[in-house]
Amino acid sequence: MKDLKHKPETVVEIQEYLSHLYGEVNKNRDVEYLFSYLFRNVSYLSRSIPRELNCVQNFIKTFSWLFAIANKLEINLQDSYLKKYPDVCPYCIAKPCVCSKTNKKPVSYVMEWKIQEELGFKYNIAKSANPNPSMDSLVESTNDLYPANTHIWKASGPTFHFFRLLEELGEVHEAYTSFCKGTKNRAEIENELADCFAWTLSAWGIYYLGESLQDSFITYYYNSCPVCNSDPCSCEPYSDRGEMLVKIDELRLYREKVAELIKAAPDHNDLLQSILKDLEFAEKQGSTTVAVSAVKQSDSALEKLSGELNHADSSAKSIKSIIGSANAIVQSFNWFS
Ligand SMILES: [Zn+2]
Ligand SMILES: [Zn+2]
């Protein structure tokens, strides 16, 4: 992306850029492969948001897998979104949506053909008013249309939001399998992808209010594919970097930092030797559960040790500093929670 004079500015340009970057490698991957990564990123997003972690990467990856599925099925995601959400809610035909009062229908009776005509009319207006929206303008219009999403999130947390997104993911899969069976057409998949897209756009707008999703895309892809740094991507299948499973090299880095304490705090040799043995055991096991438990115990034992240090002792400062660095390493572990 850094070599591009014209950086993607619209949803369509982002989808085209991702098609250029991943179109070739995804040719040999089926939709189920792409869907499994989409699902994984949504689940990690739903786990990271309540903990108020930095979720930019999970957001961008979630959107990217949505675009990957759209590209694979030759669906224009922006157009699918506008068809489904042409600046009015497709169920109550209102802006902002009043579905919570009307139980997902118009305020007064409207013939079904009239609703469809109205949506088509609104789609044409929305398209001519802003034919090339950016990701940011879709974030804004989604949350303008559904202000209740923000109210519910602020009052009771993001659980409901992610429950809905999860439901939509299931519907994307069903629409795809029905399409494969020949019982539903591609429009059904477009419709469900648009829902996933809308819930994710809305989540970004609530969690990162005022921050540019468009710019975050460019930052994420600035050096092309963030895994292989090639343009187009040349990643082998399953070459993701992993997030939630223990990374042994990170664990080793932590153990080496703790080992520095042996010299600095000889009075606590027994405790430190036990911790180091445990961390070595965890490294050999390679299990995330064992690693998380060993690091948790070590981290709190060191915190306790730090609190008990006699400040008059000249070595206390350097011991505290090593413990502080060890804790900073722990904080950088994605897989540690
Ligand atoms: Zn509505
Ligand atoms: Zn790559």
Image (cartoon, grey):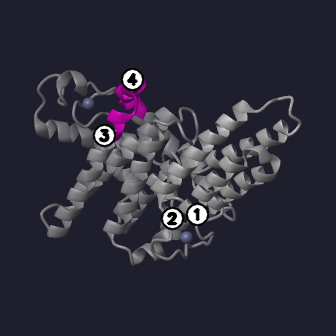
Q: Mark 4 near mark 2, Cβ–Cβ under 8 Å?
A: no
| Magenta residue span | 143-164
- What residue is drawn where x is 49% and y is 37%? 51
331 above or below 69?
Answer: above
Spatial CA distance of label 3 from label 4 is: 16 Å
| Three-letter amino acid code of the residue under disc 1 | Ile
Instruction: Using the numbered discs, state the Cα–Cα distance from disc 2 to disc 1 in whole angstroms.
Output: 7 Å
- Spatial CA distance of label 3 from label 1 is 33 Å
| Figure disc tally | 4
Q: Please state the horizontal and vertical placement of residue 18, each as a whole percent of the image.
A: 50, 63
Crowding at mark 2 (Cα within 10 Å: few <14, some 14-19, many 20+):
some
Q: Quadrant of residue 188?
A: bottom left
Q: Which residue matches tag 2?
A: 286
Res. 35 visible in picture: yes
Residue 32, position as x, y percentages in the image: 31, 67
Q: Is residue 318 above or below residue 217?
A: above
Which of the marked residues, 3 or 4, is nearer the chain's N terminus? 4
In the rendered structure, are the residues bearing label 3 and label 2 in contact, judged by CB atoms less than 8 Å apart?
no
The one nearer the camera, 163 or 17, is 163
N-terminal of the two: label 3 or label 2?
Answer: 3
- Confirm or deny contact between disc 2 and disc 1 (CB under 8 A): yes
* Quadrant location, ligand no. 1: top left
Mark 4 vs mark 2, CA separation in Å: 43 Å
Q: Nearer the viewer, mark 3 or mark 2?
A: 2
Residue position for label 3:
163
Element at label 1: helix
Q: Callout 3, which amino acid? A: Phe
